[in-house]
Amino acid sequence: MPTEPTDTRLSLDTRAARNLATTTKTRPQMQSISSRWLLRMLPWVDVRGGTYRVNRRLTHRAGRGRVAVAQAGAGDVRIVPETLTEIPALRGFGDAGVLAAVAESFTAREYRPGEVVARAGDPVGETCVIAHGRVERLATGRYGDAQFLGVIADGDQFGDEALTDDDPRWPCTYRAATACTILFAPREALHRLAERSPALREHVARHRESLLRPVNRRGEAAVAVSAGHTGEPVIDGTFVDYDLHPREYELSVAQTILRVHTRVADLYNDPMNQIEQQLRLTVHELRERQEWELLNNREFGLLHNTDYDQRIYPWSGPPTPDDLDELIAMRRKTRLLLAHPKAIAAFFRECNKRGLVVGSIEVNGHEVPAWRGIPIFPCGKIPISAGRTTSILALRTGEDDQGVVGLHQTGIPEEYEPGLNVRFMDINEQAVMSYLVSAYYSVAVLVPDAIGILEDVDIAAPRS
């Protein structure tokens, strides 16, 4: 831009005057700061010893996990042998050679949408693992009406009764909802492997014995209680058995080294303290990472540590009011729902189609959307897959309600915020000061039904 000659101006140019004026300025801004609702809504437990142990009642019923499947080519789909221990009858079995032989007994079949995989009441002749696709579970009601029991998908298995029962029958009908690839292991082949392997035979026998032990509806060791009696009968004695190997959570850490040149700290501290502003933005970045870890860390993150029995799939694809109702109904006292903003928008679209109005609720002075009176908090750290699907989490929180709790330790040396400290390290030969900034944290699920996940939620907007 050309400048006006100085000999024609009658007063000082504003651009020159600005060099001498004090500007009105903001603190340094940061675009990546999010609402961090998970950190704000979790109750935090002070872990004095750095480790948090979750004691539970002894559980006899083995949970059902997901079997991994590897695809070497278009028609070459195989079981990853080590993951067969996710089948309840094989839980804890460690003979890699036998597991490899079991994996080899599986063969793949293709199903078109609507085809029946297994029919209720028929003999269970095979153990099945879904390699790809979605399968519906159907039953006939008491009055002859069709009942929809839910959807299972990649990695889920059914028919493991073929290993344990003498005359197993399919409890419901399994029907392909999409194009499916399903792996089958014949019952006879599994029994032949058990006959050749004493270790497998003994392991399955122990599992069958565990199925006969009295348990409550959650699979915990039953407590004998007498009720409704009269007179003076002998009342059974009992005790509550505990898990001998409770899970322990060690505090994780996120760290960085903040560097500030002494010249900057000495000369440019008015009107804003440079170290303070650098530290403020660094702490924000650490807290953002902390929330990401609480969700995505494979060791303790909620997305990876939710019990598979607490994971469900949407009925059709996008998150509908029916899906959220089912997710909420799986636990008592659901305190909050956590979803990616795009998943929330997809849920709103489904409500709009049905003419439903999503409510709202005030939380800490903020108006947030709510469903059935439960707030739905946005969280952009829940990942979206390449297929445009994501997850919605439902949480019960707090130690008193046997929910989900955040873990940190307060009172650590040179603490800057709860669970976060800042330590001066040194000044190097280039006159640069270094500060070690550390955040210590973890998250624990006290009982399995404290958290549930609606998985594979389709968030792609349909074309109009």
Image (cartoon, rainbow, N blue to C red):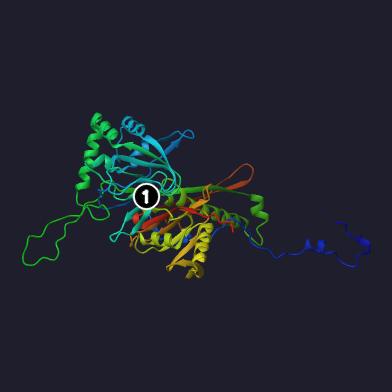
Task: Tell me where residue 414 appears, x and y as whole percent.
Answer: 48, 54
Residue farthest along the left direction in this orientation: 232
Which one is in front, 411 or 243?
243
Residue that numbered label 1 is attached to: 308
User: Which quadrant holds residue 123?
Assistant: top left
Task: Tell me where residue 93 appears, x and y as whole percent.
Answer: 29, 37
Task: Tell me where residue 391 appears, x and y as whole percent.
Answer: 46, 54
Number of marks = 1
In the figure, is residue 432 to the left or right of 95?
right
Residue at coordinates 49% horizontally, 35% vertically from top-left? 74
User: Which quadrant holds residue 403?
Assistant: bottom left
Which one is in front, 99 or 300?
99
Residue at coordinates 64% horizontally, 50% vertically from top-left? 262
Task: Tell me where residue 30 appears, x and y as whole percent.
Answer: 61, 57
Residue 447 in sight from this viewpoint:
no
Residue 206 in sight from this viewpoint:
yes
Residues packed near mark 1 inside 10 Å, few (<14), some (14 to 19) or many (20 plus): some
Secondary element at image label 1: helix
In the figure, is residue 223 to the left or right of 98?
left
Name which residue type carries label 1.
Tyr
Which one is in front, 340 or 35?
340
In the rendered view of the protein, which quadrant contains the N terminus? bottom right
Residue farthest along the front direction in this orientation: 144
* Relative to 200, residue 124 above or below: below
Residue farthest along the right direction in this orientation: 7
